[in-house]
Image (cartoon, grey):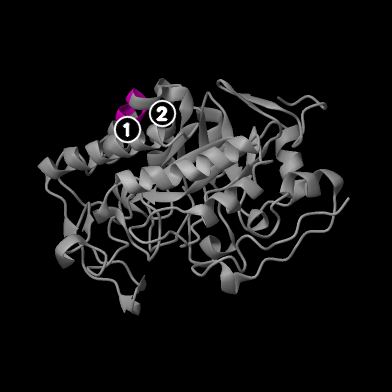
Amino acid sequence: MNTTDVNLFAPYKLAKLELPNRVIMAPLTRQRAGEGNVPHELNATYYAQRASAGLIIAEASQVCPQGQGYPHTPGIHSPEQVAGWKLVTNAVHQHGGRIFLQLWHVGRISHPDFQPDGALPVAPSAIKPSGEALTFEGMKPYVTPRALETEEIAEIIQQYRRGAENALAAGFDGVEIHAANGYLIDQFLRNSTNQRTDNYGGSVENRARFLLEITETVTSVWGGNRVGVRFSPSGTFNDIADSDPAAIFGYATEALNSFDLAYLHIFEAVEADIRHGGRVLPTSYLRSLYNGTLMVNGGYDRHRADAVITTGQADLVAFGTLFISNPDLPQRLALDAPLNQANPKTFYGGGATGYTDYPTLQV
């Protein structure tokens, strides 16, 4: 992979998928699902506009009602949501694109306002996160979650199975397991949020068990080569931390080798993580442990992205904010053309403004 003819714009064979380039659209929560957290035509238009990405990773979608933590985020647990996602996958495929869905459970990063019957959110341990939840009624302090009983964990794993099955029925090309950014799987991995004394807590082997059992279940639906996993080993988002990220993420990374995954997706340290005291784990460490395709994400521009590809530090680069405001991002990067500036005020919620109205290049 470190030959000079391999760069950001070279094709890449991702299992059975032929990617026309290595410019990946990162999963981006936009909070624009319809009633019942159902995707609709506006979402289909948004993703179809971005079909020139080597691969689209669609936004995080909760695998069960309990997994929701924000207003208007799509789910993948009801027949109506499956039908809504079919609109999206059909539109992307009609425009020649490829699309995975990110499977999500937020764990403690929720609020009783989102929970069935107003129940407490669940987590590995009853540890309250700092900060506030964005609810339908505005910002509210997070609550102390309820620690999952050991026997409940198997049902959550089955919810991931059903989410994977629903994503297959909805026409996706694969799925990504969201094990990053301080959400439920990440909460099990990190010892700041996992203080369990059963088989899911304590040692790195036990803390990784939840992730690995979910991965086994999801790959049993899709086959490993259509499943990715996302980590944020240096991340501090959602009040997450670990005393030894090299130990837990090194163990988990090596364990994932046995599944022959489509890719491992690393969200790297950004300025906010460093500012909040995050322990930076170099991607090169995980690269040395992982046998398959490595994708990186975290504030890349064209030249940094091209450099990590040409030097073999990564195989694919995911872009987030740049894809929000540049639906034709691969073309703009290839031409080194000017980029549209994103408007953060329209990132979350709303309609077409700041979602489907960014212009493409006129060439």
Circle nearer the N terminus (1, 2): 1
Which corner quadrant of the image does residue 126 belong to?
bottom left
The answer, for residue 353, to whether it is visible in the render is: yes
- Where is residue 25 drawn, in percent x and y? 61, 46
Q: State yes or no: residue 284 in magenta.
A: no
Look at label 1 and name its amino acid. Answer: Leu
**Quadrant in the picture for the N terminus:** top right
Q: Is residue 85 above or below residue 357?
A: above
Asked whether, in this view, residue 192 is left or right of residue 46, the answer is: left
Q: Is residue 108 above or below residue 268?
A: below
Task: Give the labeled residue for mark 1.
Answer: 212
Which corner quadrant of the image does residue 175 belong to?
top left
- The region drawn magenta spans 216-220
Looking at the image, the residue that sits furthest to the right is 363
Q: Residue at x 36, y 54 (%)?
A: 183
- Where is residue 189 drawn, in percent x and y? 33, 45
Task: Give the labeled residue for mark 2.
Answer: 256
User: Mark 1 touching mark 2, by CB under 8 A?
Assistant: yes
Q: State yes or no: residue 217 in magenta.
A: yes
